Structure formats: C-alpha cells, structure tokens
Image (cartoon, rainbow, N blue to C red):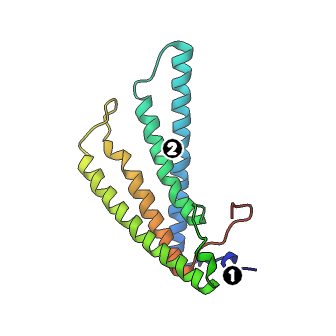
Amino acid sequence: MNATVLPAVYDTTSVPARVLDLLDRAVTGLLLVAVTVMVAVVSAQVALRYGFNRSIDWADEISRLAFVWSIFLAVPLGVRQGAHIGIDIVVLKFPAAVQRALRRAAAAVSAATMGAIAWAALGVALEQWDELMSTLDWSVGWFIVPVGLGAGLSALHLARIVVQGPPAAALGSAE
C-alpha cells in the first residue's frame, strides 16, 4: 500500500482538536441553516411570482446572502476532509517521505494565505459595516463575514495538516 493513502492519525482528545471539532459542528449547523433559508426563500419567491403574481421585496438579497454564507462555510469542511481538487502529478514522482513534506509545505503556504484572506475580510467587513443593503436594514458587511469565517477555519485545518499530516483519502472519493 502506498504510504500517502495511509490514514493520518489525528489527535482527537487534545483541547485544540476538540475546539476545532466544535467549530466544525457549529459551521455545519450554520451551513444547514443557510441552505435551508436559501431554498425556502427562493421557493417561496417562485411560488408567489408565478402562482400569485406577487413577490417578496427582500427575497433576492436574503437568498444571495444565504448563498454566499453556504459557499464560504462549506470550504473549510472540504479542507478538513482533503476534498478539494489538487494536482499532484509531479508530487507523486517523489518518494513517500518527500511527498509528505511537500504536502505539509503546501498546507503551510495555504494556511498563511487563508489567514491573510481572513484578516483582509475582517478589514473589508468593518469598512463596509455602515453601508446598508437596499431592501433590508442590514449591513452589506454580512456578505463579507462568511469569507473571513471560512478562510479562518480553513487556515486552522491547514495548520493541522502541517502539524499532523494530510487526511487519508475517503473510500469512494475521486482519488
């Protein structure tokens, strides 16, 4: 068996591991709420528009907001499982120990990048906080908040990969 597909043994009892698991559960809950809101609002809007010739003024903004939240909250969950697309044609030419080192180095660079994105998203959200959406009395900063949350949690998962190694490919995955 190739050493790169052996499962990475993650410490699940440490405080950081439990905190990361708790954050993942919270993000999963928020993701489910966002998708539910998006589907419910869009479905209601379609039914009202085509069935009753009416519409909901705020449906477009709420559904767009829920879509943005669902996309950016799903990203760290994919990072956690190693589900994102990677091109490893060159990496696979090296011995297993070099492959692991390269994957950890890539995770380190990616963690730093995600940390920078999270920091920048915080700044943008704060800059735009006083600007309101056109149909709701809500800040447009709420469109940027999930970018920062997703990038921050992704950075934590990538840091875990740097320390403990990449997760194993799941059975039935594309790999």
- Check residue 3 in the rendering and tell me which mark sits there, or answer none: 1
- Spatial separation of the CA atoms under disc 1 and disc 2: 39 Å
Q: Residue at (53%, 64%) from the top-left corner?
A: 22
- Check residue 34 in the rendering and tell me which mark sits there, or answer none: 2
Q: Secondary structure at mark 1?
A: helix
Question: Foreground residue, 36 or 1?
Answer: 1
Q: Is 131 rendered above or below residue 13?
A: above
Question: Foreground residue, 156 or 116?
Answer: 116
Question: Foreground residue, 94 or 173?
Answer: 94
Residue lying furthest top: 53
Q: Report whether 23 appears left or right of 135.
A: right
Closer to the eye: label 1 or 2: 1
Q: Is 97 rendered above or below residue 34?
A: below
Q: Residue at (58%, 61%) from the top-left corner?
A: 85
Q: Is 61 rendered above or below residue 50?
A: below
Question: Foreground residue, 137 or 161?
Answer: 161
For the question of whether residue 117 can be seen, the reply is yes
User: Looking at numbered disc 1 in the image, what kind of residue is underneath it?
Assistant: Ala
Q: Secondary structure at mark 2?
A: helix
Few, some or many residues within 10 Å of mark 1 (<14, 14–19, 20+): few
- List x then y, in percent, for residue 86: 57, 65
Say which quarter of the image contains residue 62.
top left
Q: Residue at (50%, 47%) from the top-left corner?
A: 70
Residue lying furthest right: 1
Q: Is 93 rendered above or below residue 75?
A: below
Which quadrant holds the C terminus? Answer: bottom right
- List x then y, in percent, for residue 142: 36, 46
- Sequence order check, earlier mark of 1 and 2: 1
User: Looking at numbered disc 2 in the image, what kind of residue is underneath it?
Assistant: Ala
- List x then y, in percent, for residue 38: 52, 37
For the question of whether residue 9 can be seen, the reply is no
